């Protein structure tokens, strides 16, 4: 087996090191380019391509070699794989440079697999061919010669080393290169190694070309030409006479001359290594029997004791009778390549990383010294053994999954895996496909894993604190906050937990303490814990851990099963605590701004261990966050109650005009304690009509509430002062907001429920309204059909003093309901407003048969449960006037002053659409 491993190449002598250094110098000298920009690099590529194409004799030589290459690269592919292994790169290739670049051998080649053709202008190989010298690129990302190259931009090319291939006429016919996606410094020895491999590749290319020509011409003459051109040995064995003919090159390798070589197969066998005689004979016999191909690799032991490695390739040629008459072929001296492999083997043995290679049957074929040490087994025990037999715990593990995946897909994998006793360790493994098998590079990382586990524990504790903090930010109810915290603590730091709240007041702590939540890691034990929670507080003793903490202690900690009186008095509570079987307990206070707001009691069962100092430190941080959140929740509740009360005082009571039933709802946002700007109003005016107002002042603070009150009062006063249409009143309000420096911007609708004489005779009413950038009213008809009164809306109130405003009208039949509302009822985050409006319309139709008060309640409950915004809703239902006023509409409260008493000036005020809002006269 050849040992296929990546590694470096050491110079075997001072001369070799010197020659390699010269090679690097030549490469560096030959690859200094003038330009630094992308255009310069592209120009260089075009120049190199033109130089290659213009050399017609060189191009003809490249074409000749290309015609002779077998599909898949043949023996040339082995040289390419060896280049990648010796130089430790994931990619290597051999390309011929004719009118275009053709890949004839490759390992993960950038252009593509063997047979891929690309223009010369897109190939670094063309630069190698044009210069005839090595091309060394150590950092492609910063090398100006590669500016704009696609392989550099997408990260496939980080470092490149290429050397020229020369044909038998010494013309450059191609290039051999290795490359990788990361930057790298190339040594002189590595350049020399690639040049040696390129020489072998050139020889193999000549063999392939001559082999193809041999099939079309005189076999012996062409084989002689091959020997002369490439320094190869040729042979011919006449099976009938037994005469074996070798050329001078082959005689020299075997240390024969024309006089000492007997010309028989026995002379051949006499120089073969004893271990190689049988397999070589078997290969010859198989070729003769089938008139097929003969291939062999063997050692030649020369009289001076030196050993040479040869590879032979030939064919048994049939005669007229159809049986083999002769065997002809060529040999290649691979001693230098074998020496390189030996150097690689030495590198393997010196590596600080374990390495082993398994064949297709999962048998160990090579194990280096570090692998012996890590695995605790000598290589004599491992070599030839099946990995699954020698390491049975690997079956069904990550090891087997990774190795078999590499064998099936040919894709390298990297993984960490644990192997149990006797190794009892963690290993980092890189498995790669090599020579029909799988190779593994590995190192023990047990200590690193332990360090990572410690870091992971610290990370989990940080996540615990972050999770608790994030959860508390969104929850303002103290009980819900504690219930939300317990899943972060159980089972992360405890097996069960009980959360308690401490009310404010002057009574004893047992009267103010309430166990509000409990959680057990084992669902089967949850009922026991809940029963204990319900009876625990009355059973707590005055010397209990709870009492100690409430007396000012930082924490109370104990281990072992508690005895009666230690925590709770003897009785049901102690029996339940005994059933929970805590082996370690801790009680910690929940303090915020100097006040104890509650407690957390945490317990661990036997086997979990006591609470460590690190546990307690983490818990103190968590308790501080919870305590602060509870204090914030307490403050929020107080502020929210105050805000709601203030908000409601700013909203007026509803009138109860004749045969009209009014209802209103105001619901503050579910979160936050600020005062909102949503508002409604309803009142009757001297002309007998009922005014309905809904609006939303921008902002959610006390300033918004004050502005809302100012706008409301100015609007109410203006509507009472003059008998005008809603559009005219809102236009006057624009001037008032400007002149009085109210400083508010608000949406709003002012509507009037009127009953002109002609409609009164029919029992009908008229709804006249003007919309200042607000949501459209909803009309619920007597038959249950709901209609959004979508009309063009005007500018918001307060934007500018001179705003054209318009009225809109609709007839309201008895039994109809008009709804005015703010955006909190319909808007949802991330949803189009039209969706929310349609949801309101559909809901109103479904609830149309409900009494008005119930309708309002259901709309709020169904459409705005826990809304993030304030909700204001104003509804009016018209009852038939030829029937008694329904009891649910309340007593009849209407103005006693009829509209006919109003002055002519007020009666004649404009009421039509398009009122533009002139500044009102001084006596208005």
Image: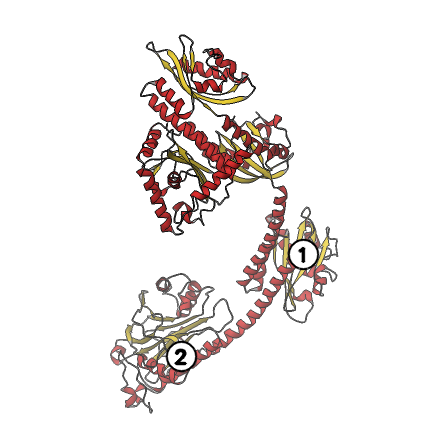
Is residue 495 depicted above or below 756 in this figure? above
In this picture, residue 620 sits left or right of residue 79: right
Question: Where does residue 481 sit, x and y in percent of width and height?
Answer: 57, 61
Asked whether 483 or 47 is in front, the reply is: 47
In the image as oriented, which residue stretches furthest toward the left? 758
Asked whether 152 or 714 is in front, the reply is: 152
**First in residue order: circle 1 vs circle 2:** 1
| Image quarter of residue 77 | top left
Give the labeled residue for mark 1: 616
Residue 830 visible in image: yes
In this picture, residue 592 sits left or right of residue 748: right
Give the labeled residue for mark 2: 655
Decide: few, some or many residues near mark 2? Use Cα within 10 Å; few <14, some 14-19, many ≥20: many
Is residue 416 depicted above or below 494 in this figure? above
Question: Where does residue 593 sit, x and y in percent of width and height?
Answer: 63, 69
Is residue 378 depicted above or below 697 in this figure? above
Checking the image for residue 680, the label placed there is none
Secondary structure beneath label 2: loop
Query: Do the numbered discs 1 and 2 sit on residues whose CB atoms are within 8 Å?
Result: no
How many tags in the picture?
2
In this picture, residue 213 sits left or right of residue 476: left
Is residue 463 depicted above or below 369 in this figure? below
In this picture, residue 456 sits left or right of residue 760: right
Question: Where does residue 665 sit, x and y in percent of width and height?
Answer: 43, 71
Secondary structure beneath label 1: helix
How are the colours assigned in the image?
secondary structure
């Amino acid at each position: 087996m050849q040992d296929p491993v990546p590694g470096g190449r050491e110079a075997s002598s001072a001369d070799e090191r010197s020659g390699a250094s010269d090679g690097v110098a030549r490469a560096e000298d030959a690859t200094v380019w003038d330009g630094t920009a992308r255009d310069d690099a592209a120009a260089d590529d075009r120049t190199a391509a033109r130089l290659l194409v213009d050399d017609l004799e060189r191009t003809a030589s490249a074409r000749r070699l290309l015609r002779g290459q077998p599909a898949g690269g043949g023996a040339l592919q082995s040289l390419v794989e060896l280049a990648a292994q010796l130089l430790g790169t994931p990619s290597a290739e051999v390309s011929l440079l004719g009118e275009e670049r053709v890949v004839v051998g490759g390992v993960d080649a950038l252009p593509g697999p063997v047979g891929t053709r690309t223009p010369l202008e897109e190939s670094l190989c063309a630069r190698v061919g044009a210069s005839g010298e090595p091309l060394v690129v150590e950092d492609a990302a910063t090398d100006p010669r590669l500016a704009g190259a696609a392989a550099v931009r997408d990260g496939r090319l980080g470092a490149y080393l290429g050397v020229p291939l020369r044909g038998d006429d010494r013309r450059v016919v191609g290039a051999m290169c290795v490359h990788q996606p990361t930057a790298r410094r190339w040594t002189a020895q590595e350049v020399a190694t690639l040049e040696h491999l390129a020489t072998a590749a050139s020889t193999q290319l000549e063999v392939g070309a001559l082999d193809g020509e041999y099939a079309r011409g005189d076999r012996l003459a062409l084989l002689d030409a091959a020997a002369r051109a490439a320094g190869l040995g040729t042979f011919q064995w006449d099976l009938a006479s037994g005469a074996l003919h070798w050329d001078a090159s082959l005689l020299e390798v075997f240390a024969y001359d024309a006089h000492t070589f007997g010309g028989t197969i026995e002379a051949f066998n006499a120089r073969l290594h004893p271990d190689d005689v049988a397999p070589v004979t078997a290969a010859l016999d198989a070729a003769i029997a089938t008139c097929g191909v003969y291939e062999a690799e063997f050692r030649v032991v020369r009289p001076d004791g030196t050993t040479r490695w040869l590879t032979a390739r030939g064919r048994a040629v049939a005669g007229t009778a159809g049986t083999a008459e002769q065997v002809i072929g060529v040999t290649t001296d691979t001693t230098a390549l074998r020496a390189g492999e030996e150097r690689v083997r030495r590198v393997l043995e010196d590596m600080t990383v374990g390495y082993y290679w398994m064949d297709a049957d999962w048998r160990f074929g090579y194990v280096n010294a570090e692998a012996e040490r890590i695995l605790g087994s000598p290589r004599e025990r491992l070599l030839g053994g099946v990995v699954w037999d020698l390491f049975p715990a690997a079956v069904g593990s990550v090891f087997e999954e990774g190795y078999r995946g590499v064998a099936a897909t040919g894709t390298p994998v990297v993984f960490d895996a644990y192997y149990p006793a006797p190794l009892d360790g963690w290993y980092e493994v890189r498995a790669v496909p090599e020579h029909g098998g799988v190779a593994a590079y590995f190192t023990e990382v047990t200590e690193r894993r332990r360090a990572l586990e410690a870091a992971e524990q610290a990370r989990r504790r940080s996540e615990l604190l972050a999770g608790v903090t994030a959860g508390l930010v969104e929850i303002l109810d103290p009980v819900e906050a504690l219930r939300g915290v317990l899943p972060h603590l159980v089972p992360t730091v405890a097996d069960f937990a009980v959360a308690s709240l401490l009310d404010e007041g002057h009574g004893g702590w047992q009267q103010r303490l309430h166990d509000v939540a409990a959680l057990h890691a084992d669902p089967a034990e949850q009922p026991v814990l809940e029963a204990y929670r319900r009876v625990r507080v009355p059973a707590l003793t005055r010397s209990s851990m709870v009492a100690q903490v409430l007396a000012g202690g930082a924490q109370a900690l104990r281990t072992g099963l508690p005895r009666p009186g230690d925590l709770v008095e003897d009785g049901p509570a102690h029996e339940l605590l005994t059933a929970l079987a805590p082996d370690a307990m801790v009680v910690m206070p929940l303090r915020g701004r100097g006040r104890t707001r509650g407690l957390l009691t945490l317990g661990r069962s036997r086997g979990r261990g006591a609470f460590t100092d690190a546990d307690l430190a983490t818990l103190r941080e968590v308790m501080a966050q919870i305590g602060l959140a509870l204090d914030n929740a307490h403050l929020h509740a107080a502020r929210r109650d105050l805000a709601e009360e203030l908000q409601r005082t700013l909203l007026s009571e509803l009138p109860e005009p004749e045969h009209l039933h009014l209802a209103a709802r105001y619901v503050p946002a579910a979160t936050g304690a600020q005062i909102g700007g949503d508002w409604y109003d309803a009142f009757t005016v001297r002309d007998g009509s009922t005014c309905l107002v809904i609006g939303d002042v921008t902002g959610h603070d006390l300033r918004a509430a004050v502005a809302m009150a100012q706008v409301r009062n100015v609007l109410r006063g203006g509507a009472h002062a003059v008998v005008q249409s809603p559009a005219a009143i809102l236009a006057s309000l624009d001037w008032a907001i400007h002149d009085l420096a109210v400083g508010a911007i608000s949406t709003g609708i002012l509507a009037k429920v009127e009953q002109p004489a002609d409609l009164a005779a029919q029992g009908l009413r008229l709804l006249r309204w003007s919309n200042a950038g607000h949501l459209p009213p909803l009309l619920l008809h007597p038959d249950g059909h709901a209609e959004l009164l979508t009309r063009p809306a005007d500018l918001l109130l307060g934007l500018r003093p001179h705003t054209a405003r318009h009225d809109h009208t609709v007839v309201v039949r008895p039994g109809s309901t008009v709804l005015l509302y703010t955006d909190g009822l319909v808007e949802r985050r991330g949803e189009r407003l039209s969706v929310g409006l349609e949801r309101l319309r559909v809901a109103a139709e479904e609830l149309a048969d409900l009494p008005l008060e119930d309708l309002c309640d259901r709309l709020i409950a169904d459409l705005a449960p826990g809304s993030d915004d304030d909700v204001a809703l104003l509804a009016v239902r018209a009852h038939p006037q030829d029937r008694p006023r329904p009891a649910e509409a309340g007593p009849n409260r209407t103005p006693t002053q009829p509209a006919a008493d109003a002055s002519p000036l007020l009666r004649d005020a404009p009421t039509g659409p398009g009122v533009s809002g002139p500044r009102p006269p001084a006596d208005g």
